Amino acid sequence: MLGDALSIQCIPNGVDLAAFAPGDKSAARQALGIRDSAKVILFVAARVIQGRKGLAYLYEALHSMQNTEDVLLLTVGSTEPSHQQLQRFEQLHLGHIADESRLNLAYNAADMYVLPTLADNQPLTVVESLASGTPVVAFDTGGIPEMVTHLHTGYLARYKDAA
């Protein structure tokens, strides 16, 4: 082993808490053109269709839902997800968002942030979502269990279990 194991420390990623903070859900939805009655599921990734982000598992979970009435899938990222796989669901793709205040609106508008990532050490989007007051649903992989407290700040599913 290299070095002294007792001297190794993990310094987690941080976000600007002035930029990412809880806000008025109704106002955020109005700003983004989302109706108040929608059940908003948010998915954020630089490249939405990147395989390791687990979008296929999100599709699987959505298709297993019994009641999909009023569900809106809100996506943020540089590539738009395939609409064919989500024909049953209303969708809104906001594209790439560089402005933190607008990204915070997306988190504030959401009822939950879902990140079924297959390989992420400490996703910044999880930190942003939690700072915005939005619960996180994710697999219990990588550094996510260190950030999300199961059934308190979100839900941790078994790795690759979309049910």
Image (tube, rainbow, N blue to C red):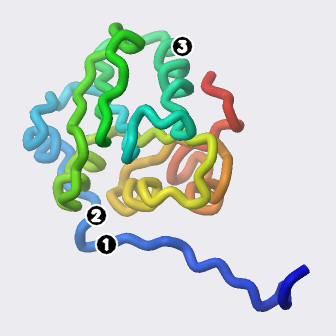
Q: Label 3 neighbourhood size at 10 Å, few (<14), some (14-19), many (20+)?
A: few
Badge 2 is on which residue? 21
Q: Label 1 neighbourhood size at 10 Å, few (<14), some (14-19), many (20+)?
A: few
* Secondary structure category for the residue under label 1: loop
Badge 1 is on which residue? 17
Return the mark for residue 149: none
Give the residue drawn at x 24%, y 45%.
96
The answer to whether mark 3 and mark 1 are in CB contact below 8 A is no
Q: Quadrant of residue 159?
A: top right
The amino acid beneath tag 3 is Ser
Question: Residue 11, how many percent across, how many down?
Answer: 58, 79
For the C terminus, the quadrant is top right
Spatial separation of the CA atoms under disc 3 and disc 1: 35 Å
Q: Is residue 101 left or right of residue 149?
A: left
Give the residue drawn at x 35%, y 8%.
88
Badge 3 is on which residue? 64
* Secondary structure category for the residue under label 2: loop
Measured along the vertical axis of the image, is residue 137 above or below residue 21?
above
The answer to whether mark 2 and mark 1 are in CB contact below 8 A is yes
For the N terminus, the quadrant is bottom right
The amino acid beneath tag 1 is Leu
Q: Is residue 49 left or right of residue 8?
A: left
The amino acid beneath tag 2 is Ala
